Amino acid sequence: VQYKHRRTAGEVWRCKKGKRTDIKPGEWDRFNYAAKEEVINRPIEYAGNIVPVPRIKRKDLTPEYFLEHFASKKLPLIVEDACEDWPAMQRWSLEALEERFRHISFKVAKDDKGKKLRMKFKYYADYVRTQQDDSPLYLFETNVDDNGYIRDLCKDYEVPDIFPHDWLALVNNDARPPFRWFCIGPKRSGTTVHTDPLGTGAWNAVTHGLKRWVLMEPGEAKRKVKGRDLIKAGEDDEAIMYFDFILPRIKKEYPELKIYEGLQKPGEVIFVPGDWWHGVLNLEDTVAVTQNYCGPDNFDVVWCKARKEREKVAWLWLRNMKKFAPELYERAMEMNRRDKFRMRHERPKGERLPDASSSSSESSSDSSSDEAEDLDPAGLKAAASTDMPLGAAGFKRQGAAPLPELVTCARAGFERPGKRRRQKEDPDLA
């Protein structure tokens, strides 16, 4: 492979070596899937229990209808023409992104210890255009809100109005689990079948490219949906292999298993209900944004999982429910009383929950106290008290407004000396 930039090869080698220790960086194309276009172009055959993901045009869908007929019933859906008016539809092409972020590093992988592996965008774009890997490096950036260099990505799209709820926003962004991802998936990249954390629901919007999805209902055995017993010696289980030969074997071995499949095109949003198994294969170089949420359709499940799997987050969440969303707090406490569940602050020091996962001991601080201005009001309208302003509206004015001349004086103190000199010499610049 010949790259445009001199350093691209070294950066790609470094990230590949960190991501997979089972094969060498030079072996990422060992199955030669770049030459097997039939796998990418293979049509989906619907028959029996192989059914299409339902599709509805955005103009024919209201938030109320979506909540009643899909979210509340835990049914997946592809919404057509859902984001065609987003700036991202133009601003997120690979060329436009490279022009804006060429020297900014994005996360393209994680190593065995969970350390993020980052690469400058100009090198990653170079890699995307020329790669021949079976399962390429997948840019999956979780740090969009906190990274000032890329925060403007959030201005390029808006959360679809059929997803108005984000009740985990009652936990401040420093403590809540990751929930928003900006993604670039090169052709043949993807994710194998999995469920999202804490039973949260998710939406995924594609601005460029094409995705193939497979979904299976909650409650199906992990070993069955992943085809663990159907993988032969020497075979890999990356997304391209899953869609190539593992999924067909699953369909043949378990004809009673209901499987949803569908293609997601630019401008379309897919809804994945909580606890549904799902996997994706990028059939083209694809750019997308995805968010997980908690709302009225899944709060009970998310709370019951969070209190066990993410104890510190659950305690912070409960404390802020009591302060800002008392009805939600009572709902959570009622479930605790029903299940005789004791939160971490209610148990003797050192006592752990039986079968608690390692992630329940995450490093989120539980000593700080959130104020109204620490919380993002978006997504909390149906949960938070109406008389409690959140976010920027929560800031309290300290005393009377300063005099105009004091504002002018203070502003002058922060201006560059050169600018002040120019204004003094040329009053028209003032």
Image (cartoon, rainbow, N blue to C red):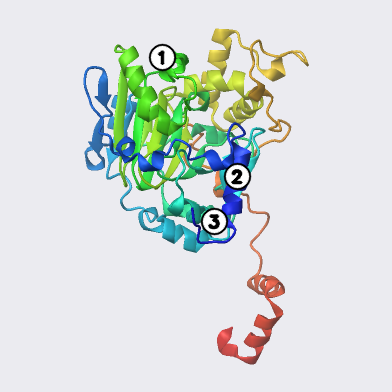
In the rendered structure, which disc, 2 or 3, sits on the residue that comes first in sequence?
Answer: 2
Q: Which mark is residue 39?
A: none
Looking at this view, is 328 or 129 the one in front? 129
Percent of width and height locating residue 233:
49, 20
In the rendered structure, which disc, 3 or 1, sits on the residue that comes first in sequence?
Answer: 3
Q: Quadrant of the C terminus?
A: bottom right
Residue marked by disc 3: 123
Of badges 2 and 1, nearer the viewer stands: 2
CA separation, marks 3 and 1?
41 Å
**Where 85 falls versus 429 (above or below)?**
above
Do the residues bearing badges 3 and 1 touch, measured as CB atoms within 8 Å? Answer: no
Q: Which mark is residue 220?
A: 1
Q: Which residue is painted at 66% across and 88% down in the image?
A: 424
Bin the neighbour count of mark 3 within 10 Å (Cα to Cα): few under 14, some 14-19, many 20 and up: many
Percent of width and height locating residue 298:
44, 24
Residue marked by disc 2: 15
